[in-house]
Each structure stands twice: as C-alpha cells, then as structure tokens.
Amino acid sequence: MLQDISPHHFDIAFEKGDGHSPQAKDLVAAWQGDELLLCGEKGQSALPTVEQCMQAGWDSGKLRYLFSLDEQAVYYLDLADTPFPFPKSCRLEKASSLREISPQHLSFIALVSAHLHRWYNAHHFCGHCGEAFTLSQKERALICPNCGLVEYPRINPAVIIAVTDGDRLLLSRYANRPYRRWALLAGYCEAGESLEETVRREVQEEVGLSVCNLRYYKSQPWPHTDSLLMGFYCDVEGKTEPRIDENELAEAQWFLREELPIEDPKQLSLTQEMIATFREGREPKSKQAEA
C-alpha cells in the first residue's frame, strides 16, 4: 500500500523536532496553496534539500520540523507567507497528482506533508476567541495563548467495507466523482458511533443490505482526505440484491473471485489490496466459514 516504503523508515514522532536544527542534507516540503515544490523530472522527483533552499536565499529560521525519512529530517514551509525564489530545477506539483509521482516513498511523505499543510493553513486563529495560535513546544499541536484552546491535526476515521457472499464480492462505482474505478463500500464514522456500527450503517445506507460476521483486516493512513482508513470484511445477511443510494453510487455489482477487475496492480490503496486479497482467497474467514 501507499505507506509500505520499506526499506525506508518514516518517523512522525514529534520529539525529534525538539531542538532540531536544519542540516544541509535535510529536506523541505514547501507549499504554495495546493502545490508542492519538487525537483527533478516527474519520473524521479525529489524534495529540495535545505542546502538547495539556502543557496536560493531562503531563511532557515522559517522552517518547521515535520517528520523524518531515514536519516533526513523533513521541514515545512508555506511559500504564501514567505515568497522565496525557487531553487534551480524545481517545479510546483499539485497535491492531487502526488499519488502518481515516483519513487513511492517520496509520494507518501509528500502526501503526509500535504495533510499537515492543510491543517496548519486552516488554523491560523483560535476558533473560540480569535487569537493567533502558537506552536506547542511539547507535542504536535496549536495552542491559543489567550483561552488555552488546543488544536490537534485533523484525522478523519473511516471504514472500507468488503461485503462478501460466499465466493462473491460486492463492488461499486461512485456517483458524481472523477474516480471511476470499481471500489469497495466506504464511509466516515459519525460522533458516538463504533467502527462496527459504521460498517452496518454505511452498507444499509448505500446498498440497502444487512451484514454480519464482521472481520477486521488492517488500517491505512490516507492523507489524500486527512483520513485513517480501517478495513473490514463482512458477510451479507438476508437479501443480496443491492438497492443503491444514487446520491452516493452510480452502480453496485457482485463479482466472483475470478471475475474481479485488476485496476491498480500496485495496490496503493486499502480498497485495492482488499479486493486483491479476496481474489486470491486470502481474506480473513468468518467463524461460520471455518466451521
């Protein structure tokens, strides 16, 4: 999946930013609106180094620590606040295209930096009293110096749902969205709702079916939508003919294992990995199936 970047090691721990000063080889995630500054060609892109940015006249005091990749720290800069000239051979790349850049470890850290950029950019002022936020010195958070309100990065919990019926898997296509591939059912958790309750509600709302025997598969950070995805397999219970919510879905269809489409061979998303896992018969089995 997108975050599987071994042998590279991603470390989001905040404490590494405490007292950390930018080194020449460290990297900079510099954002201008919804565009990220990248160096090199699209086939083999890179983030600019601190040294490249300093040579272009940037002020290292403006850099904010984000996370590390292997032995390199990655820093954040909002170019809207400090319109520095670009280092040589650099270009702006829209956030929506970062999933397609290579190598994969760069795609992942670029998208995580996009997640944090959106959060920083949307929280300059306290939503309670209007005072300008300051950075916490002990954790990744913003603090209002007037009323004490603390804001943490927004992470939206969501479920990815593989509804099964023996050797059949239910796939759907979204309505009114540019993404046209077949996908599993999905939805965000509501306040006061467990993950299991979200699974049952979303299936009922989107295709009018009931499910049982929920089995957790795995999770995935999905920075495209500032989300944490949690995958479940479940069995259809009772009627099997889907009745779609046309506001959400364009269509829903059952596929036999051997008929399942292969639309993303890289399996960057949890959805595509779960489809492939079912196609290969490796999905977690229900207790009823094991019996």
Image (cartoon, grey):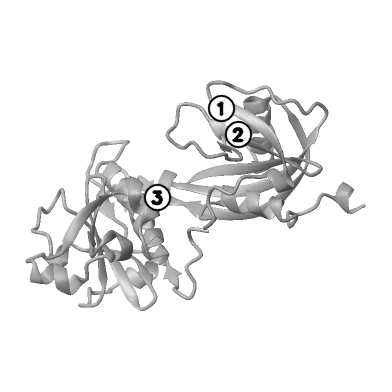
Going from the N terminus, do you reach mark 1 or mark 3 first? 3
Task: Check disc 3 and give the amino acid type.
Answer: Pro
Seen at 88% across and 54% down, the residue is: 290
Badge 1 vs badge 2, beta-carbon distance below 8 Å: yes
| Residue extending furthest toward the right | 291
Q: Secondary structure at mark 1?
A: strand
Q: Which disc number belongs to residue 169?
A: none
Q: Nearer the viewer, residue 264 or 237?
A: 264
Q: Is residue 139 visible?
A: no
Comes first in the chain, label 1 or label 2: 2
Residue 92 as seen in the image, left or right of residue 240? left
Which residue in the structure is indicated by mark 2?
172
Give the spatial CA distance, label 2 vs label 3. Answer: 31 Å
The label shown at residue 153 is 3
Residue 111 drawn at (x, y percent): 37, 54
Residue linked to disc 1: 249
Q: Residues within 10 Å of mark 3 (few under 14, many from 20)?
A: some
Give residue 36's quadrant in the image. bottom left
Query: Pointer 1: residues within 10 angstroms few (<14), some, or many (20+)?
Result: some
